[in-house]
Image (cartoon, grey):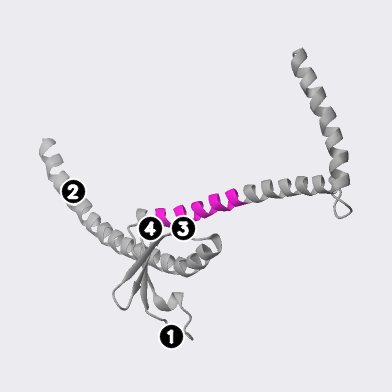
């Protein structure tokens, strides 16, 4: 419940606001009336809220994309080395860039022909820049995963062959023991 003092204060504030409105609308001239000005502020506030909501959503999606890539690189112990030609169009000379590395921590390192290295966190890039980087890096990630899969396939085949002989040997070893136990 409101106290009597609060009610008087609100009443006084309301009457002052109504006086201010007429005073201000007269002072603003014909360029922009108070109602139009208030409507613009209201619309501006709505736009700010929508921009902030979308910006936060884009940041979240950007971080998800970075996490997706870095978790794959970490899980499968991949080293992503991307040739400079992938980043620089062939019609341009390629500049001083020699190669680009991407590690499991989300650090992208640009190696130059003069031996210098510049490194940046993927999270420091704007979403549009990050999409450009990912469009270049993802085919190399896919190729690295294919190589890793082939390595596992070869190892699986080799171990399967060995297991086949171990199983055969295990059966041979069990057979004489079973025969001895029978009599």
- Image mark for residue 73: 4
- Please identify, in this view, whether the residue under mark 4 or under mark 2 is nearer the observer: 4
Which span of residues is magenta-colored? Answer: 55-71
**Residue 106 on image: x %, y %:** 40, 57
Residue bearing mark 2? 170
Give the secondary structure at mark 1.
loop
User: Marks 1 and 2, Cα distance to the nearest angstrom?
Assistant: 64 Å
User: Marks 3 and 4, Cα distance to the nearest angstrom?
Assistant: 19 Å
User: Between disc 4 and disc 2, whose residue precedes?
Assistant: 4
User: Marks 4 and 2, Cα distance to the nearest angstrom?
Assistant: 39 Å
User: Marks 4 and 1, Cα distance to the nearest angstrom?
Assistant: 30 Å
Q: Is residue 144 left or right of residue 66?
A: left
Residue at x 30%, y 64% (from the top left corner): 154
- Please identify, in this view, whether the residue under mark 4 or under mark 1 is nearer the observer: 1
User: Between disc 2 and disc 3, whose residue precedes?
Assistant: 3
User: Is residue 70 shown in magenta?
Assistant: yes
Q: In which quarter of the image is the N terminus?
A: top right
Residue bearing mark 1? 93
- Please identify, in this view, whether the residue under mark 3 or under mark 4 is nearer the observer: 3
């Amino acid at each position: 419940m409101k106290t009597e003092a609060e009610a008087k204060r609100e009443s006084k504030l309301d009457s002052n606001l109504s006086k201010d409105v007429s005073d201000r609308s007269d002072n603003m001239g014909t360029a922009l009336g108070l109602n139009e000005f208030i409507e613009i502020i209201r619309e501006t506030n709505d736009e700010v809220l929508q921009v902030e909501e979308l910006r936060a959503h884009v940041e979240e999606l950007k971080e998800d994309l970075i996490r997706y890539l870095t978790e794959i690189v970490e899980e499968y112990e991949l080293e992503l080395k991307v040739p400079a030609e992938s980043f620089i169009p062939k019609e341009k000379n390629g500049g001083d860039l020699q190669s680009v590395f991407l590690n499991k921590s989300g650090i992208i390192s640009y190696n130059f022909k003069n031996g210098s290295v510049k490194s940046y966190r993927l999270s420091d890039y704007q979403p549009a820049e990050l999409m450009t980087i990912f469009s270049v890096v993802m085919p190399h990630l896919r190729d690295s995963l294919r190589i890793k899969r082939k390595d596992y396939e070869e190892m699986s085949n080799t171990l399967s062959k060995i297991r086949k002989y171990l199983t055969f040997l295990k059966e041979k070893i069990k057979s004489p023991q079973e025969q001895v136990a029978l009599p």
